[in-house]
Amino acid sequence: MTTTPVVPLPLWDLVIHLSDGRCQCTGACGNKHAAGQGRCEHENGGFISKHAGPIRLLAAPKDPADLARPPHQQAKLSACDLAAWCPPCHDNARTRAQRERRKALADLAADDSLF
Ligand SMILES: [Zn+2]
Ligand SMILES: [Zn+2]
């Protein structure tokens, strides 16, 4: 048995098609993307810099909070819950979501200790 990717290829194709092959980040990564009128300008197959290889967009949860979920939970999402992300936006948005999640959990734990 082979390992299955988090997002099956037909779903990836659909998500990338729906996004016009362009990263759908609108600031969740912490970059306001002013140059792209609020949306990241990275396109699938485009280049971030002269030295990096072509961008391969990722199909990942549209809601950045879901990026912090484990892969088996992300795998249950359908195309309408997914968005195209370029790797830098995805990584930064996920890091931010994980930080928020940890903060929320820490706040919960702090609340518990009060009572
Ligand atoms: Zn992006
Ligand atoms: Zn971004």
Image (cartoon, grey):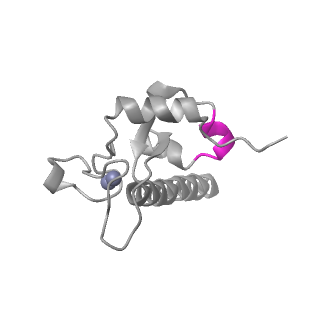
Instruction: Residue at 61%, 35% (x, y): give it.
Output: 8
Quadrant of the image occupied by residue 9? top right
Instruction: Residue at 46%, 28% (x, y): give it.
Output: 14
> Nearest the camera: 96 or 22?
22
Q: Position of residue 102 (x, y in %)?
A: 55, 58
> Nearest the camera: 69 or 37?
37
> Nearest the camera: 43 or 27?
43
Q: Position of residue 66 (x, y in %)?
A: 52, 42
Instruction: Residue at 30%, 52% (x, y): give it.
Output: 42
Residue 52 seen = yes
Instruction: Residue at 40%, 47% (x, y): give it.
Output: 85
Q: Which residues are magenta?
A: 69-75
Residue 62 seen = no
Q: Position of residue 1 (x, y in %)?
A: 85, 40
Above or below, comparing residue 96 to residue 69 in the picture? below
> Is 2 included in the stretch rendered in magenta?
no
**Count of numbered tags:** 0
Q: Position of residue 64 (x, y in %)?
A: 44, 45
Quadrant of the image occupied by residue 76? top right
> Is 74 included in the stretch rendered in magenta?
yes
- Determine the residue located farthest toward the right in the rendered image: 1
- Determine the residue located farthest toward the bottom in the rendered image: 51
44 sits to left or right of 11? left
> Nearest the camera: 12 or 100?
12
